[in-house]
Image (tube, rainbow, N blue to C red):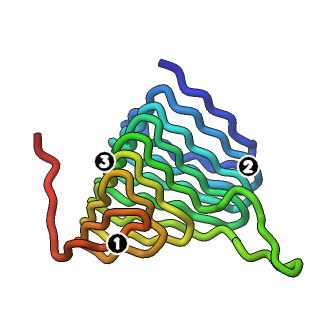
């Protein structure tokens, strides 16, 4: 398996030698961007895009990003942070931007916003996480959900748009 990596010269790359990156496409365009992939992170068939200046994508220790996931940090000074011990299942999209500006009376109404997924969070298949969302630690996001608002720690959120249906939960990664 091969990775495709296209990175501008001023990009800061911090990819752990103990990370496993298989068949991924990584594109970084712009100045002073950062890509951090921590110890024992696993990425398989993932698309990572940073487009803009002073943007960051960070994937924490022991996090697993599954097949056909798409992580995008676009525009200026934007951060997409996935903390340690997180799991993103298949076909998850995490996008800090709408990908195009929208104006009303010549004023932009859809700026990009940071996304943070705190430690030990599980994201199910086909979930979309949109700009400005902060998901607390220990959460579970159900299959096919679209997350448009913050999710408090130790909660289960499901649906489109995702709503919290359980609180004070814990989960374990067991077979």
SS for callout 2: loop
State the residue in front, 162 or 135.
Answer: 162
Query: Where's residue 23, x and y in %?
Result: 49, 26
Disc marking residue 101? none
Residue that appears at 64% across and 61% down: 97
Residue closest to the far right: 106
Residue 38 higher or lower than 160, as above or below: above
Which quadrant of the rendered structure holds the C terminus? Answer: top left
Spatial CA distance of label 1 from label 3 is 27 Å
Residue closest to the far top: 1
Residue closest to the far left: 175
Q: Which of pointers 2 and 1 indicates the residue nearer the eye?
A: 1
Residue that appears at 73% across and 76% down: 109
Query: Where's residue 155, x and y in %?
Result: 25, 71
Query: Where's residue 85, x and y in %?
Result: 29, 54
Q: Which residue is mark 1?
A: 163
State the residue in front, 61 or 141.
Answer: 141
SS for callout 1: strand
Q: Which of pointers 2 and 3 indicates the residue nearer the eye?
A: 3
Pick whichever of labels 2 and 1 is earlier in the sequence: 2
Q: Are marks 2 and 3 in contact (CB under 8 Å)?
A: no
Q: Are marks 2 and 1 in contact (CB under 8 Å)?
A: no
Residue that appears at 74% across and 47% down: 29
Q: Which residue is mark 2?
A: 10
Q: Locate residue 124 relative to residue 48 in the image: left or right.
A: left
Residue closest to the far front: 160
Q: Are marks 1 and 3 in contact (CB under 8 Å)?
A: no
Pick whichever of labels 2 and 3 is earlier in the sequence: 2
Residue that appears at 20% across and 73% down: 166
């Amino acid at each position: 398996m091969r990775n495709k990596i296209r990175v501008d010269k001023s990009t800061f790359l911090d990819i752990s030698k103990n990370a496993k990156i298989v068949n991924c496409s990584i594109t970084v365009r712009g100045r002073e961007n950062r890509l951090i992939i921590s110890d024992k992170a696993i990425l398989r068939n993932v698309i990572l895009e940073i487009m803009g200046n002073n943007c960051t994508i960070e994937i924490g220790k022991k996090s697993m990003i599954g097949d056909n996931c798409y992580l995008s940090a676009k525009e200026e000074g934007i951060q997409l942070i996935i903390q340690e011990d997180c799991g993103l299942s298949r076909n998850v999209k995490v996008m800090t931007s709408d990908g195009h500006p929208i104006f009303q009376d010549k004023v932009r109404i859809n700026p990009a916003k940071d996304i943070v997924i705190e430690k030990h969070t599980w994201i199910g298949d086909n979930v979309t996480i949109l700009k400005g969302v902060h998901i607390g630690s220990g959460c579970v996001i159900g299959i096919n959900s679209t997350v448009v608002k913050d999710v408090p720690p130790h909660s289960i959120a499901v649906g489109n748009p995702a709503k919290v249906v359980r609180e004070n939960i814990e989960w374990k990664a067991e077979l």
